[in-house]
Image (cartoon, rainbow, N blue to C red):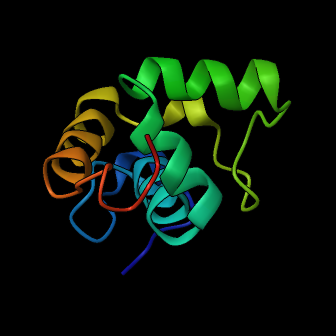
């Protein structure tokens, strides 16, 4: 059971390292604009730079900071997204 006294970042969340990583992955995979941006970026670092610096969003709509998500888990997710997407077929490039 969740213990309020333990910081939420110490808990794994639905197979992800923590709540922030889960929430960032959830937003990228369930918001078409974020998904398309993730496919266009060369990696999670570029994605974060664009979303924060160009768009002005420091957090997801749920309050998870993009920088608090586990880099390697989100990068792996983005690699899998790109491997399974034929961008020319969908007319993105």
- The x and y percentages for residue 42 are 36, 22
Q: Is residue 78 above or below residue 61?
A: above
Residue closest to the eye, 46 or 88: 88
| Quadrant housing residue 79 | top left
Residue ID at (76%, 59%): 61
Q: Number of callouts in the render?
A: 0
In the rendered image, the quadrant that contains the N terminus is: bottom left
- The x and y percentages for residue 74 are 32, 40
Residue ID at (69%, 51%): 60
Residue ID at (44%, 55%): 91
- Relative side of 25 to 88, left or right: right
Residue closest to the eye, 14 or 91: 91
- The x and y percentages for residue 68 are 52, 32
Q: Is residue 27 above or below residue 43?
A: below
Q: Is residue 14 visible?
A: yes
Residue ID at (43%, 40%): 93
Most extreme residue toward the bottom is: 1
Q: Is residue 59 above or below residue 1?
A: above
Most extreme residue toward the right is: 56
| Quadrant housing residue 86 | bottom left
Q: Is residue 7 visible?
A: no
Residue closest to the eye, 77 or 2: 77
- Relative side of 30 to 87, left or right: right
- The x and y percentages for residue 35 are 49, 55
């Amino acid at each position: 059971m969740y213990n309020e006294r333990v910081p939420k970042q110490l808990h794994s969340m639905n197979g992800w390292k923590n709540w922030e990583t889960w929430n960032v992955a959830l937003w990228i995979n369930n918001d078409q604009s974020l998904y398309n941006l993730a496919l266009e970026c060369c990696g999670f670092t570029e994605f974060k730079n664009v979303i924060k610096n160009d768009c002005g969003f420091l957090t997801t709509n749920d309050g998870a900071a993009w920088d608090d998500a586990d880099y390697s888990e989100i990068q792996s997710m983005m690699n899998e997204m790109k491997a399974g997407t034929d961008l020319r077929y969908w007319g993105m490039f």
